[in-house]
Image: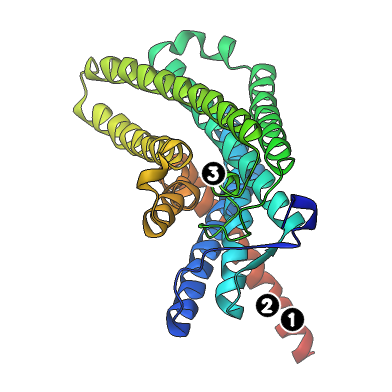
Amino acid sequence: MSNSSSMPQFLLLAFTDRRKLQVLHFWLFLGISLAALLANGLILSAVACDHHLHTPMGFFLLNLSLTDLGCICTTVTKAMDNSLWDTTTISYKGCAAQAFFFLFFISAEFSLLTIMCYDRYVAICKPLHYETLLGSRACAHMAAAAWATGFLNALLLTANTFSLPMCQGNALGQFFCELPHILKLSCSHSGYLREIGLIVVCAFLFLMCFVFIIFSYVQIFRAVLRIPSEQGRHKVFSTCLPHLAVVSLFISTGIFAYLKPPSISFPSLDLVVSVLYSVVPPALNPLIYSLRNQEFKDALRKMMTTCFLRINKLHLFFCRTLIV
């Protein structure tokens, strides 16, 4: 294959060659997908239906749920299809689309996580300025900036990667179309260096966001330690520490996946790292950011109670109609 135009498809890395384990992987990913769909669907419904959740944090959680669903659907669904039908192929255009949408959602998600950290910082450290700094217009601008940043980052990296000639075969050492593995197939040295430069710049920007998150949490923890109530301190710590753990896992594994030296690249290690930053955080975000929040629990309980009452009324109506 002399260039990318003559490459009809790529070969993705299979989790295993044993049929029983392939079926097991399918059911595992199906469970993750359904759990993410259910949890994020509940969050979207709760925020849309309950006016008590029409807050800056609720607005950002709604956007985060959309990026979580996008990340899961972009990577996991194709892996499920390959495991179920015992295949590893993906078309050239399909690979380009998967790489673009994954970068789009993952970049937007990290931008939203940074914004949500800023929201917590203002709420805890500068509560008197909360309405001023996080008004409805400011929240809309920040969310739009997060989505625009994800789109531009994905467009730039994907377009530059798939414009390179590829002559090193078509086998990718990953279960989805990840840019570092696609770059290994390139035979353009100058283009490869240009793309690596773009990835380094993006990784540096993500690292700066991570530094901002760490700085914000340091200020939050300092403010929390001054709270006289032990129950109040425990409430904030129980929320903030899981946030920080997931963000740390997300950024550390993501930067490692994109910037690790080729000498320590192994298929099993690459699979584990990619799952840790592409599947685990989007699957855990609904639990950590929403379902641990008492307001969301109350909103979900109220919504489910209303749904059950309506179902019971509908059931009684049909029963009476049939009796008549």
Front label number (3 vs 1) = 3
Residue ID at (45%, 40%) = 254
Q: Residue furthest bottom?
A: 323
Q: Amino acid at mark 2?
A: His
Q: Secondary structure at mark 2?
A: helix
User: Which residue is labeled 3 in the image?
Assistant: 180
- Residue 17 x, y percent position in the rendering: 46, 78
Within 10 Å of the Cα at label 1, are there few (<14), some (14-19), or many (20+) other Cα atoms? few
The answer to whether any part of residue 50 appears in the image is no
Give the distance between the C-alpha atoms of the residues marked 3 and 1, in whole angstroms: 58 Å
- How many residues crowd mark 3 within 10 Å: few (<14), some (14–19), many (20+)? many
**How many angstroms separate mark 2 from mark 3 (CA)?**
55 Å
Q: Is residue 124 above or below residue 54?
A: above
Specify the quadrant of the image occupied by residue 120.
Answer: top left
Asked whether disc 1 touches disc 2, contact meaning CB atoms under 8 Å apart, the reply is: yes
Q: Nearer the viewer, residue 260 or 184?
A: 184
**Which mark, by number, is residue 318?**
1
Q: Is residue 60 visible?
A: yes
- For image coordinates 30% across by 33% down, the residue present is 235
On screen, residue 284 versus residue 189, left or right, reads left
- The kind of secondary structure element at disc 3 is helix
157 or 20, nearer to the observer: 157
The residue positioned 33% from the left and 15% from the top of the image is: 219
Would you say 177 lies left or right of 243 here?
right
**Residue 315: mark in rendering:** 2
Disc nearer the start of the sequence (2/3): 3
Of mark 3 and mark 1, the one earlier in the sequence is 3
- Label disc, if present, on residue 223 of the rendered structure: none
Give x and y (percent) for residue 66. 63, 45
Q: Nearer the viewer, residue 39 or 143?
A: 143
Q: Amino acid at mark 3?
A: Pro
Q: CA distance from mark 1 to mark 2?
A: 5 Å
